[in-house]
Amino acid sequence: MLMQVRRLSQEQEEILEEVRRIPGFEDLLQASPFEVLLQADTEGPVIVINHSEHRCDALIVLSGKEVSFVCVPGQGRRVSSAEYDEVLRLVMKVSWDRVASEVVQKPKELGIHEGLCIWWCPTSVLSALPFHAAGPYEGADGTEKYLLDDYISSYTPALKSLITARSKSMTEVGGRIFFVADTRLPSAKKERDTVRRVRRIDKQLLDDPGDSGSSTKDASEACHTAEQHPKVAMDEVLRLSSAMQFCGFRSVIGTMWQLLDRDGPFLTLVIYTYLIAELGEGEVRFKKAAAAVRDAALRLKERGD
């Protein structure tokens, strides 16, 4: 058995060496040099949150600054049901108190002001926390605020994924909409009709997941496309949303927990209206995804229901 393991390991290494001779795959399955990882901070700070049994730190990647990164140490410490709501609010508050409150102060000190995009790169069990919604806390004007009131938040499963997405052509090209839905959810057809109000749907697939190449075991499954499931290794980043990024999609909007079905059409309308709006000079649509989600969340919060 040991000899077989050694032989297979040697074969694997030989195959990897062969693949690495192909242009574009030189560092396949190898750690990226630190100088390369610094390229992730070209459009806003990237915050890597490390977690282990010994300590927890937040590393803020800062290319183009006097310092390349800043360490913020010591960060160690049913959807419609009242119980679910109570737990979610507690998680959001703890996320602010233990992590976000200290982390977001550093960008301000370095001249990175409110309104910009923060890229979160959490690891281990922290991948399940909603840092974009951390709060509440008291704003400068004395009002109750959440992190999404001050910053646009986005997530990346790894710094290299973010670099790869940004390294592709920034030329805006025409796109098509492929709509897949499970009509066991009461609002699914309403969401489809909402999308049609802002853009033509080129192809739709209703109640036929077998032909789409994806399948859900229940109607709420799509509400967990960016969720870190407790039964999966916490350092495994290949959730559905991040897997789509690895496959080449430059921006993916995913959900970290179950969404109230009645909110779906409203969020769909706001997000797609934002994304389909006329682009400014040099602007590309995929970079608007995080801002579109934030805009929808703020407007949903303003409704107060």
Image (cartoon, rainbow, N blue to C red):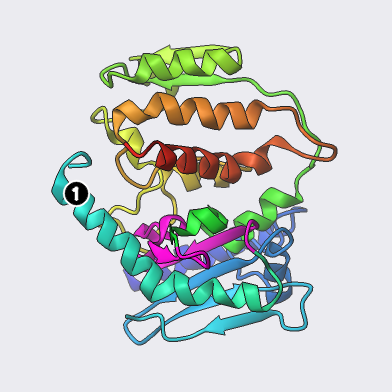
Residue at the front extreme, as displayed: 141
Residue 14 location, x and y as percent?
60, 63
In the rendered image, residue 136 lying in the magenta stretch gets the answer yes
Residue 234 visible somewhere in the drawing: yes
According to the picture, the residue beneath numbered tag 1 turns out to be 84
Q: Is residue 44 left or right of residue 23?
A: left
In this orientation, which residue lies closer to the viewer: 103 or 217?
A: 103
Crowd band around label 1 with a 10 angstrom C-alpha radius: few (<14), some (14–19), many (20+): few
Task: Specify the quadrant that holds the N terminus.
Answer: bottom left
Residue 137 occupies quadrant: bottom left
Residue 249 visible = no
Amino acid tagged 1: Tyr
- Above or below for 64 versus 295: below
Residue drawn at 38 percent across, 28 percent down = 264
Depth order, front residue of 231/225 = 225
Residue 21: give x, y in percent of width and height: 74, 58
Residue shown at 37% from the left, 67% from the top: 95
**Magenta stretch bounds:** 114-142
Apparent side of residue 145 relative to residue 164 in the rendered image (left or right): left
As for residue 219 lying within the magenta part, the answer is no
Tag 1's secondary structure? helix
Is residue 149 shown above or below 58? above
